[in-house]
Image (cartoon, rainbow, N blue to C red):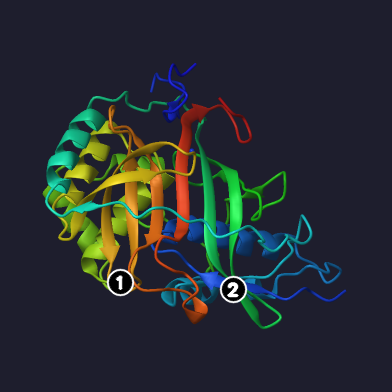
Amino acid sequence: MNPDPTQPRTANRQENGDLRATEEHDLPPGRHQFHKERLMSQIHDDRRAAAPRNPFLRKAFLLPAATALAGALAVGVLVLTPGGAQDGPHELATGPALTTTIGTVDAHGAPRLLDRISLAAAGADAPKGRAGQYVYIESRAATTFVQTVDGVSSLVSRPLHTRQSWRSPDGLKGWLIEPGTTGPDGITLEGTDEKGQVPKPHLGAPSHDYLAALPTDPDALLRKIYEETEGQGNGRDQQAFTTIGDLLTESWPTPRLTAALYRAAAKIPGVVLVDSATDAAGRKGVAVARLDETSGTRTEWIFDSKTLAFLGERTVQVKGTGGEGGLIKPGTVVFTHAIMVRAFVDDIKVTP
């Protein structure tokens, strides 16, 4: 039982007919791993389960896996067609746009804050599971985007929802349950790539075991991140910040590695302190952030002001406008994601 319900929980402390018109929206910066996971899973699921009798066959996902994934990530656009091989059509998003007050930036405060955060992270309990267990991450997430239906574009949100993922430490087995992406029973995260081979873990899609082998020297770690993400994203430094953020939100690094990631982030030019930010669960805190000059969005890592525990991440439009027709105005929360629980569990679909 966690004594403070406002904090992320860590369990197992031994060691969150005709088809309807498609919708299209910009892929929020920093969510490459998040969408790679679901896109690759859906490609695999469609290939395995789709049949001519299926009226909700998602044609977009019948492209070769490498082509579909590369296209979606290269141009920053994810095209979703309603329906799925298992669950039938998903509803188009109709919620109001998510907005926030833009926090004030301290251009020189991030290194000092990240030093304190890294010290706090290094003292956390190390995640240790037994053989055969799975890494369980439960989170809350929501997005705002430009949706185009029958040629008419509007700014909408996909409502705040709970996302649950299970991954074996080696990354070979897994499961995902997320409203709007999967049915109630979820989808498998197992599968092969377009060559029929089991994908090897890497920085963009790490396994728990892969993370354990990463260097914990901040300089060596940042050098590896720069080298392996060369040519990706909107610039070298922005992609490094994005990669570290994805590792913090979509996996469960050891305390030593987490501390090293924070110290590495402190060395990235343009990283700033934001005085106030609120995560997807409504928890307020302080943030470490970086502005993507290309998109005008700022990705913020949110920490509890007192304990310095990592709460989650959000991406806010703070400069110019984004989306089709410039509908995404400053103050729009493009993406928000709060970690609620990280734990080792005994099997897929088992919760702490």
Displayed quadrant of residue 21: bottom right
Q: Amino acid at mark 1?
A: Asn
Query: Dot 1 corresponds to which residue?
Result: 234
- Give the residue type that dot 2 points to: Glu
Q: Secondary structure at mark 2?
A: strand
Above or below, 179 against 40 in this view is: above
Give coordinates of residue 148: x percent, y percent: 63, 76
Q: Nearer the viewer, residue 330 or 182?
A: 330
The residue sitting at 66% across, 55% down in the picture is 180
Which of the image's four quarters has the C terminus?
top right
Q: Residue furthest bottom?
A: 151
Looking at this view, is 202 or 78 the one in front? 78
In this picture, residue 135 sits left or right of residue 217: right
Instruction: Decide if residue 270 is on the left or right side of residue 136.
Output: left
Disc on the earlier residue, 1 or 2: 2
Q: Any mark on residue 180, and which?
A: none
Residue 40, horizontal then vertical, whole percent: 55, 61
Q: Is residue 216 visible?
A: no
Q: Residue at x 37, y 40 (%)?
A: 209
Q: What residue is drawn where x is 30% and y is 34%?
A: 254
* Residue designated by label 2: 24
